[in-house]
Every structure is written in C-alpha cells, then in structure tokens.
C-alpha cells in the first residue's frame, strides 16, 4: 500500500541554530522523501533562520503580521498538499523513524491525533523552570487515556480534521494547541501515542517558560 503524502509544518521565530538541527534531522527520516513535504513558516525572524531554511529542500513561507506559532501553523496548513499533517516545533529534533512511526500509528489505528515521546535535554542540574516545561510538554502512554488536550510539540493528524474543526485561533501566542486539541476531544476525536515517534527537545529557561505560559494574546 502506498504511503500517504505528509506535510510537515514547522513554525519558527528567531531560532536559527535549533531550526538547523531540526531540518537536518528531517533530511535523515526513513519515511520516503517523495511522500512528504516540509513547510517552514517563518514568523519574521531577524536572525539567520531564513538563510538556514534556504539551505534545505523545504517550502519557506513568511508570515510576519504578528508573532504567533498558531498563525504560522494555519498558514502552513492552508498551503499543505498532504492528506496527513505532521506539526513540529523548530526546537524539536526528530529521530530517524519519527515520521514513519507517527504516520503508521495514525493510519493503522482508530485514533484521530497522535503524539509521541519527547526526550528532554536538561541542564546538568535541572532548574525549576526546566522541570515545569517538562511537565507541560511531555505526554506519556498512560496520560493519553485521560488526556483532554495535547501540546503541539509534535502531532500527527489527517488533514481533513481541520475542515471539520477549523484551524488554530491565530491571535493566541500560547496554549492554542491545548485549545484546538480539546476542541477535537469535545467533538469525539481520540488521541494516540506512537512509542517510536521520538523527538529530542531542549527544556526552556525561566524567561521562555513565563512567556509561553502567560503571553496569551499577540498584539493586533
């Protein structure tokens, strides 16, 4: 059976070094390169993110209207050609089998939205803020059974779900992933876990955690 065509969508803002790691890892995926596209939606970066993106065979879109990863995800989703969507943070560095494992779970089970393990990178002595970021971001197989929403650190779903539910709330800068996946949950969609869809992820510092947790609305 032919594998579904997948659109991998990555929002990015001033995260050049980690974006480079992310895109490099995506080039090493076991999923066939002719059955996927990678869409980077840059949110008006002033670092070298755009130049980094141009080093790789990706579709680069610019959305600098206002700072919101959810606005960027919406732009990518509208441009996506895939029957399946994979959402990935530019901080995430996927393992070689990440895309293969996530899509396999999505199309061979009856779940609607799939996530997977996050291998967090902590400081030598983890800080309170790093641990808080871990608690917010990491979902375990046991959590899936009780979850009513999921973080969008990395998620897999069929593209058609957006026609039913609509897109992310674009003016939200934080927690819009929880809102959208809870919206899906309220409509009867179920969550799944792909144990081999692993990403490596650096824990956020105090400044980034506070920004993530309290900056709900971007300026219009």
Image (cartoon, grey):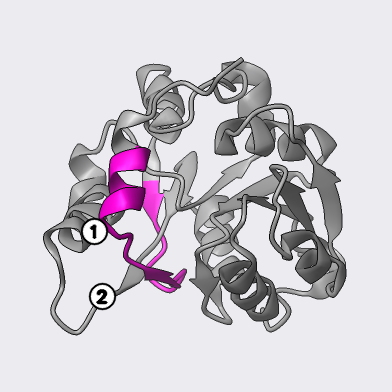
Q: Which residues are magenta?
A: 192-212
Q: Nearer the viewer, residue 36 or 216?
A: 216
Q: Residue at x 77, y 70 (%)?
A: 52
Quarter of the image containing the N terminus?
bottom right
Question: Label 1 vs label 2: CA separation?
Answer: 9 Å
Dividing the picture into quarters, in which one does residue 128 lie? bottom left
Looking at marks 1 and 2 on the same chain, the residue that comes earlier in the sequence is marked by: 2
Q: Is residue 95 above or below residue 182?
A: below
Structural crowding at the residue carrying mark 2, measured as other residues with C-alpha within 10 Å and reported as few (<14), some (14–19) or many (≥20) = some
Circle number at residue 60: none
Indicate the secondary structure of the residue bearing disc 1.
helix
- Residue 174 in the figure: left or right of residue 204: right
* Coordinates of residue 150 in the picture (x, y in percent): 36, 40
Q: Do the residues under discs 1 and 2 have CB atoms within 8 angstroms? A: yes
**158 in relation to 19, above or below:** above
In which quadrant will I find the C terminus? Answer: top right
Q: How many marks?
A: 2
Q: In this image, 40 relative to 105: left or right?
A: right
The residue at the point 61 percent across, 18 percent down is 166
* Element under disc 2: loop
Query: Which residue appears at 35% of the width and 66% of the height?
Result: 117
Task: Judge whether residue 71 can be spotted in this image.
Answer: yes
In front of the other: 203 or 139: 203
Look at discs 1 and 2 and give the one toward the viewer: 2
Instruction: Pinpoint residue 156: horizontal percent, then vertical percent.
Output: 55, 50
In the picture, measured across the screen, residue 92 lies left or right of residue 160, that is left
Q: Is residue 114 magenta?
A: no
Q: Is residue 205 magenta?
A: yes
Nearer to the camera, 15 or 112: 15
Which residue is label 2 attached to? 122
Mark 1 packing: few (<14 Cα in 10 Å), some, or many (20+)? many
The residue singled out by tag 1 in the image is 134
């Amino acid at each position: 059976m032919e594998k579904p065509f997948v659109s991998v969508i990555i929002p990015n803002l001033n995260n050049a070094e980690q974006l480079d790691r992310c895109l490099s890892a995506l080039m090493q995926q076991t999923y066939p390169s002719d059955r996927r596209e990678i869409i980077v939606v840059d949110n008006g970066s002033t670092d070298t993110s755009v130049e980094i993106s141009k080093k790789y065979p990706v579709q680069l879109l610019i959305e600098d209207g206002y700072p919101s990863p959810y606005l960027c995800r919406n732009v990518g989703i509208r441009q996506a050609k895939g029957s399946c969507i994979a959402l990935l943070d530019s901080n995430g560095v996927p393992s070689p089998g990440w895309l293969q494992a996530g899509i396999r779970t999505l199309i061979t089970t009856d779940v609607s939205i799939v996530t997977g393990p996050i291998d967090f990178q902590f400081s030598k002595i983890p800080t309170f803020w790093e641990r808080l970021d871990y608690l917010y971001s990491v979902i375990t197989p046991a959590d899936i059974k009780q979850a009513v929403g999921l973080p969008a650190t990395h998620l897999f779903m069929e593209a058609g779900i957006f026609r039913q539910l609509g897109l992310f709330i674009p003016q939200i800068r934080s927690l819009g992933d929880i809102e959208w996946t809870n919206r899906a949950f309220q409509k009867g969609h179920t969550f799944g876990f792909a144990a081999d869809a692993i990403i490596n992820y650096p824990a956020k510092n105090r400044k980034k955690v506070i920004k993530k947790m309290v900056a709900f609305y971007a300026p219009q």
